[in-house]
Structure formats: C-alpha cells, structure tokens
Image (cartoon, helix red, strand yellow):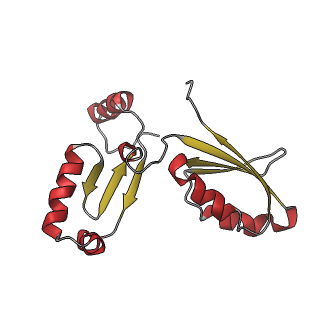
C-alpha cells in the first residue's frame, strides 16, 4: 500500500535510499543527558563533548530524547555482532502464560510456529546471555536450543 500523501518522486527517493541502505542494529537509550552525566559523574557539558566525538566516529546517533548506540560499539564492549535463534518448546498447559512472558524479552522477533517447537526467538548476539537467563525463569519452558548465525549467505 502506497501512502497517498507522498509524491512519486518521494516514493522513488525512498526506494533508492532503501536499495543503498544497509541494515544496522541499534541499541536505544532514552535517559536524559542530565541523568547520564550524573550516572557517570561528569558535567552535562563534558558529556556533550564526548557524545559529539562518538557521533563523529559512528558509534552513536542522537536525536531529541534518545541516543542510539550503533553495532559499531559491540567490539569495544566485548560483544559479538550478528543474530542468534532460540528454539523454544513449551509445556502445552502453560503455553499462554509463557507466551506473555516471552513477549517481554529483549528480542528482535518472536515467531509462534508449528512442528516440534512452539516458538522461535530472533535475538542479537549481544543480548543472547540475558535472554537465555530470562528464558530459564519462565514457567512452562520445557526445552531450548540456541543457534548462532556465523554467516549470512543471502
């Protein structure tokens, strides 16, 4: 469906930009700059200097009310880039509450599927340990299998 308020040229521009784009994972922070500066013990002015430099280097993007860390920061903090998939098998009588708990996990996508498993979670590798720890606390999770993407072929 094409949005009617866009001109043909705007649609052409969007399509062109999309073709030229590369997917980039971001991690968004919504704390205020004042809160962040207080948390790490520097002035707001000093924080702004650091943020400007990090932005120039491509580590963050900023906007009104948010700071996005790009996936370029992952090697700095010792995390791996890429995705992982967690296949989850649930106890049938506990499926509905388990689905609700799973929806709260910090994952990219959640798929309810048919077959030998009930749910597939797509998660970025930096969040994998946290997600696995949280899954283990969900009542009704019978079994998990984790697969880490080593290369995207297409």
Above or below, comparing residue 38 to residue 46 in the picture: below
| Side (left or right) of 41 relative to 100 | left
| Side (left or right) of 136 relative to 25 | right
Q: Residue furthest top?
A: 153
Quadrant (top left/top right/bottom left/bottom right) for the C terminus: top right
Residue at x 64%, y 64% (from the top left corner): 134
* Residue 11, position as x, y percentages in the image: 33, 34
Residue at x 76%, y 66% (from the top left corner): 96
Front-most of residues 149 and 79: 79
| Side (left or right) of 137 relative to 65 | right
Above or below, comparing residue 2 to residue 63 in the picture: above
* Residue 132, position as x, y percentages in the image: 65, 57
Count the labels in the image: 0
* Residue 68, position as x, y percentages in the image: 34, 54
Front-most of residues 126 and 111: 126
* Residue 86, position as x, y percentages in the image: 68, 48
Residue at x 27%, y 31% (from the top left corner): 9
Above or below, comparing residue 122 to residue 136 in the picture: above
Residue at x 79%, y 63% (from the top left corner): 95
């Amino acid at each position: 469906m094409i949005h009617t308020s866009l001109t043909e040229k705007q649609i052409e521009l969007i399509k062109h930009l999309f073709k030229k784009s590369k997917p980039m994972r971001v991690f968004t922070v919504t704390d205020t700059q004042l809160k962040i500066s207080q948390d790490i013990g520097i002035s707001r002015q000093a924080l702004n200097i650091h943020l400007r430099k990090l932005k120039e280097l491509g580590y963050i993007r900023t906007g009104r009310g948010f700071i996005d860390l790009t996936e370029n920061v992952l090697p700095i903090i010792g995390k791996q880039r890429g995705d992982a998939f967690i296949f989850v098998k649930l106890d049938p009588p506990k499926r509905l509450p388990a689905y609700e708990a799973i929806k709260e996990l910090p994952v990219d996508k959640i798929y309810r599927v048919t077959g030998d498993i009930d749910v597939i979670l797509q998660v970025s590798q930096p969040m994998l340990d946290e997600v696995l720890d949280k899954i283990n606390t969900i009542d009704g999770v019978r079994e998990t299998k984790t697969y880490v993407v080593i290369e995207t072929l297409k």
